[in-house]
Amino acid sequence: MTILILGCGYTGQRVASRFLAHGVEVIGTHRSWSIEDVRKQVTPGMLVLHSVPPQGTTGLLEALGDAPAKVVYLSTTGVYGDARVVDETTPPDSSHERIAEEQRTASGPWSSLILRPAAIYGPGRGIHERVRKGEPVDTGDNMVSRIHVEDLAAHVEAGLLSDVTGAYPVADEEPCTSREIAEFYARSLNMPLIEAGVSKIRSNRRVDGSAIRRALGIKLLYPSYRTYLG
């Protein structure tokens, strides 16, 4: 078995580590790779994680031919647009830039699974890091959902190895307001909460990721932001 990770970044590196720990061959691409470089790495029956941003996807899926057995595409809950409550039945906003790549992935000659993660956090990334560094953080009464990068990697690993198909949102078990998260980390880290002067937060959605957890048999390592301090 060979794993090809298209876009081996923050999440892709965690996925690679999981498979490497089991002695599986992993090939990870990076920004300097050309479409031809990708094409040379493709082998029949390989499993593919596609996490390349939309602006870098031209010709990428076509380079895979019909070789992969399974492709998992990492999209985003941003595709749900203005929806305030999201689950596996919520229709996406067809105008979002990620939808076209979702559709190309789903229409390929392979089994496919679309994962739409909420805000990804973990080591070096997230509100806890900004609070720890004494940087301004966005606060507000808007609802946010998140997923720890290790839990997202677990979804990807299980998804690649499963027969599950379709498109699902991915999130932890405790959506809450931006202010709740910021205040929790400020208290827990014994740091002052420095509020950003102008909020950059645009989303306001509560995401239910329980359907894909059930389908893949996932038990979250970090079911809530309260279980992770970095």
Image (cartoon, helix red, strand yellow):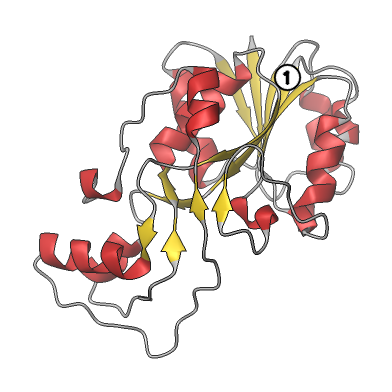
Question: Helix, strand, or loop for circle 1?
Answer: strand
* Image height of 67 relative to 172, above or below: above
Please tell me how crowded label 1 is: few (under 14), some (14-19), or many (20+) other residues with Cα within 10 Å. Answer: many
x 81%, y 11%: residue: 44
Q: Using residue 123 as the reference point, say whether residue 42 is left or right of it.
A: right
x 68%, y 50%: residue: 31
x 27%, y 61%: residue: 128
User: Residue 186 location, x and y as percent?
Assistant: 17, 68
Q: Nearer the viewer, residue 50 or 23?
A: 50
Using the rendered image of the protein, determine whether residue 7 is visible from the camera's viewpoint.
yes
* Image height of 110 relative to 177, above or below: above
Dividing the picture into quarters, in which one does residue 79 lie?
Answer: bottom right
Amino acid carrying mark 1 in the image: Lys
Quarter of the figure that contains the N terminus? top right
Q: Residue furthest left?
A: 190
Using the rendered image of the protein, determine whether residue 57 is visible from the camera's viewpoint.
no
Q: Which of 87 and 219 is in front in this view?
A: 87
Quickly name the residue at label 1: 70
Dividing the picture into quarters, in which one does residue 70 lie?
Answer: top right
Q: Using residue 72 as the reference point, say whether residue 105 is left or right of it.
A: right
x 31%, y 38%: residue: 222
User: Residue 171 location, x and y as percent?
Assistant: 47, 42
Q: Residue furthest bottom?
A: 197
User: Residue 211 location, x and y as percent?
Assistant: 54, 29
